[in-house]
Image (cartoon, grey):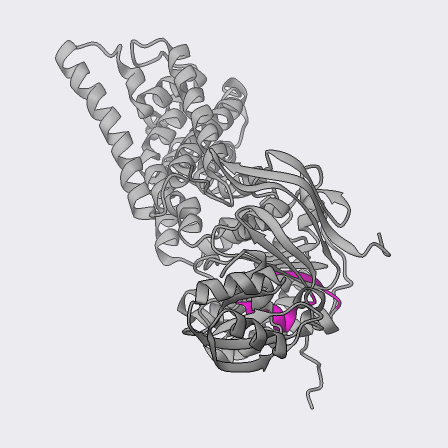
Amino acid sequence: MADDPTVVTFDHVTVRYGADAALSDVSGAFAKGASGLLGPNGAGKSTLLKALLGFVRPNRGAMRVFDLDVTEKPLGIRGRLGYMPESDAHIPGMNAVSFVAYCGQLAGLPHSDAMQRAHEVLYYVGLREARYRNVETYSTGMRQRIKLAQALVHDPDLLFLDEPTNGMDPKGRAEMLRLIRDITQNKGIDLILSSHLLPDVESTCDRVVVLHRGAIVAEGPIQELKGATRQVFEIRIKGDVERFVAALEATGATCHKAEGDVMRVLLKDDCCARDLFSLAASQHVQVRHLRPSMPTLEDVFARAIGEE
Amino acid sequence: MPIHDQTYRRYTGERVAPGAAWSVIALTGVRELVRKKFFLAVMLFSWAQFVVRAVLLYLAANFPQMEVLAPTPAMFRDFFEQQGFFVFVATVYVGAGLIATDQRVHALQIYLSKPLTRAEYVAGKLAILLAVLLVVTWLPAMMLLVLQVVFAGNLTFLRENFFLVPAMTVFGFLYAATASLGMLALSSLSTSARYVAVLYAGALLFTDAIFGAVQGVTGSSGLSWVSFRANLAQVGDVVFRMPPRYDTPWLVSLVIVLGIMAVSLWVLARRVRAVEVVT
C-alpha cells in the first residue's frame, strides 16, 4: 500500500436514487496528492463522495479507500478520513473549541489530546481568538473554516472537501486555497476537492476527474489534460459563425464560447494562427479579434462535457 | 517568534478503537444539559417527592404513633406514578431536540463522517435521555428503599419485599426506555424541537382523552390499550405484584408497549441517515 499511487479506486459503480442514476457504471481512481472533482450541478460529484464515505450504498460496483472495501470496513476508512461537507454543518450550542474537540473525540482521540489539537487546528485555520465564540454566531467564511478544522482535528490521511470556498469573500477564499495547498504540499495529507469553481481546482490540485451526467468524461493530470503544447486563441469573427465552427471542428480543433461573442479555440498540435486565417478566408468570414491564450482547466472542462 | 509553533502538526498519540463514540455523545450531551439552569431546576423539583417520602419513612421508623405511614410496596409503585409529570417535562425538554436539532443544522453528516455507526449515534442520544429519566424515577426510588433500611435499622421490610428491587429496576427501565425511544423517534421526524414537543404532548394527551371519553361513556376500561400511559400503568401494576387497574389484559398492554419501542427503533433506522434521499 505504501507504494500504491492511488488512495481511492472505484470500479463499475452505479448509484440510483429511485429511477434516476446519479452515477452509472463509473470506474476510476484518485491518486495520492491533490485531486479535483469537477462537474456541473447534478453530475454526481457529491454522490461519489458520499458513496465513498458510506453514506449511500451503490447499487452495483466496488469502491476501495486505502485499499479497504467501503462496504466492509467503513469505520476503518472513516477513522482515517476527514470530510468537509458542502452544506453548513455544526453541533448546536457549542463554542468552536468544544465543537472541534468533540469531533476529535468522536474520531477516537482521547479527551485531552482532542482538546489540545482543537486549539492547534483552530489556530491553523485562522480562527484564533474567535475559537471561544459559539459557532452559531459565526459568519459564512468562519463556518467554512470551522468545517475544515473539524475535518482536520483527528489528523486524517485523506480529506474530502466539498465546495470549500462556497460563500467566502475574495480574501477569505484566497486564504482557504492557501490552506488547502499547504495541507497537501507540506502536511502530507491527500485530498479530493469537489468544486464547481475551476480556478479553485486549478490552483490547488495536480489531477482532476470530470464527471458529467453520472459518468467520467475526463481524468488525469491537469497539465496533461490541458494539452500545454496545443495552441489556444481567443477569436471573434464576423459572418456565419456556425459554419466557421463546423469547419474548425472538422480540422480537429475544439472551440467553446468565452465572454460575449468571443470564442476560445484549441488548435490541433500541428496547426497555427495562419491556418485560422486561411480557414476564415475559405469560409468567407472576417477575423475581427485574435489573441493567443493559454490552455486552462475551463477548456478541459468545456471540452469534456461537450459545451460549445 | 512564538515559543510554541501553532501550525498544524501530525498526530502521533493513541486512538481509541471504534465502538466507544456513543459514550462520548452521551457524556457530552449530559455535560451540556447540566449547564442549563432550567434543566437543573426541573431535576431539583423532580426530587421533591423523594424528600417528602424520605421524611415520612423517617417518621414511620422512629415514631410508633406514625405507624400509619409505614412503607408498603404500593408506596413505591405510587412513587413512580407520581413522578410521571417530571418524566413528561424531562422527556420533552431534553428529548425533543436531541435529533431534530442535529437534523436542522445538518450535524448528522458530521457525526457519520467519523468512525461511528448510526446505531452508535442513536445509542448515544438514547443514553442521554435514558440517564435523565432514570435519575427522575429509578434512582430516587432505589434510594428510598435504602433510606428505609437505614431509618428502620433492620432489613425486615427489604427481606419481605425483596421483589421491589427487580420490580423497580424492570419498570424504571421499561418506563424510561419507552418514553426515550418514542421521543427520539419523533425527534428524528422533524427539524423543529418545538414541533416535536407539541407532537409528543399531543400524542399522550390525545390517546388519554380517547380512553377517558370511552371509559366515561361505557363505564368500561377495556379500551385502555389505546392510551400510552394506561398501558404503562397496567404493566407497572403487574410488575409490582398488584392487581391490574384496567380491564385490558396486561399482556396486551405489554405487547403494545413493546410494539411502541419496536416501531420507534424502525423509525430511527429509517430516519437517522447522513443523506436524505429524495426520490
* Front residue (pair B260, A203): A203
Residue B113, relative to residue A62: is it above or below? Answer: below
User: Residue at (47%, 27%) from the top-left corner?
Assistant: B168
Count of marks placed on residues: 0
User: Residue at (67%, 67%) from the top-left corner?
Assistant: A268
Instruction: Give coordinates of residue A201: x percent, y percent.
Output: 60, 67
Instruction: Give coordinates of residue A76: x percent, y percent.
Output: 72, 46
* Front residue (pair A141, A201): A201
Residue B196 lies in the magenta stretch: no
Residue B74, relative to residue A279: is it above or below? Answer: above
Outermost residue on the bottom side: it is: B1
User: Residue at (39%, 53%) from the top-left corner?
Assistant: B40
Instruction: Give coordinates of residue A15: x percent, y percent.
Output: 56, 39
Residue A44, relative to residue A223: is it above or below? Answer: above
Residue A97, relative to residue B37: is it above or below? Answer: below
Q: Quadrant of residue A274?
A: bottom right
Regarding residue A95, the answer to whether it shows in the image is: no
Per the rendered image, the range of residues in magenta is A188-206
User: Residue at (41%, 11%) from the top-left corner?
Assistant: B251
* Front residue (pair A21, A124): A21
